[in-house]
Amino acid sequence: MIIRSVEPSDVEPLLDMLKKSGQFDDEGLLHVRETLKNYFSGEFDELWFSAEQEGLAGIAYCAPEVMTNNVWNLLMLWVSPSRQRQGIGNALINQIEKELRKKNARLLLVETSSLIDFSAARAFYGKQGFVSEARIRNYYAINEDKVIFTKDMREKSHPSL
């Protein structure tokens, strides 16, 4: 498996992968395209990584939180369903954390849904050393809360690093 920074040639395969997942509507795909355009402009301090394992297998996107002191948010961690449970998500998180330590990040956030469909994601973040820190009720929709996980980047590396 290869983890590397996303390149312009990755944009269309990445968007195609997300579209085929059925988890991104046209508005979501447009947002990803615009975010990547901003990333490639070099004007924004963001991180985009891809995982390759017999083709594009996953992506991670992380950006600094505005008006904070060295706080970053892992805004997207997506692994192709056929490639899940093969260490790809773990490898992407490890790469994000490695880069954030170079940037002296203090805290890493990740947000996800409270729906049962996201229970595997919540368990995954717990295994990666994240702590369930907060819940905002009815955030995404009625009866769909936002669950916020945090990880102190000043602590020693996670044992799997």
Image (spheres, helix red, strand yellow):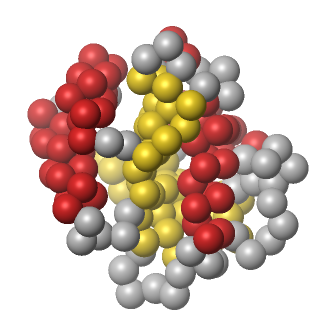
Image quadrant in which you'd find residue 7: top left
- Say if 57 sits above or below 143 in the image: above
Which residue appears at 82% of the width and 44% of the height? 160
- Say if 55 sits above or below 25 in the image: above
Report the number of discs.
0
Q: Is residue 5 visible?
A: yes
Which residue appears at 31% of the width and 47% of the height? 141
Would you say 100 lies left or right of 26 here?
A: right
Q: Nearer the viewer, residue 42 or 154?
A: 42
Q: Position of residue 108 (x, y in %)?
A: 58, 66
Which residue appears at 56% of the width and 74% of the height? 103
The residue furthest right is: 159
Q: Nearer the viewer, residue 3 or 138?
A: 3
Q: Position of residue 5 (x, y in %)?
A: 43, 46
Which residue appears at 63% of the width and 58% of the height? 97
Image quadrant in which you'd find residue 87: top right
Q: Position of residue 128 (x, y in %)?
A: 72, 47
Q: Nearer the viewer, residue 150 or 48?
A: 48
Q: Is residue 136 visible?
A: no
Would you say 130 lies left or right of 36 here?
A: right
Q: Quadrant of the N terminus?
A: top right
Would you say 61 lies left or right of 26 here?
A: right
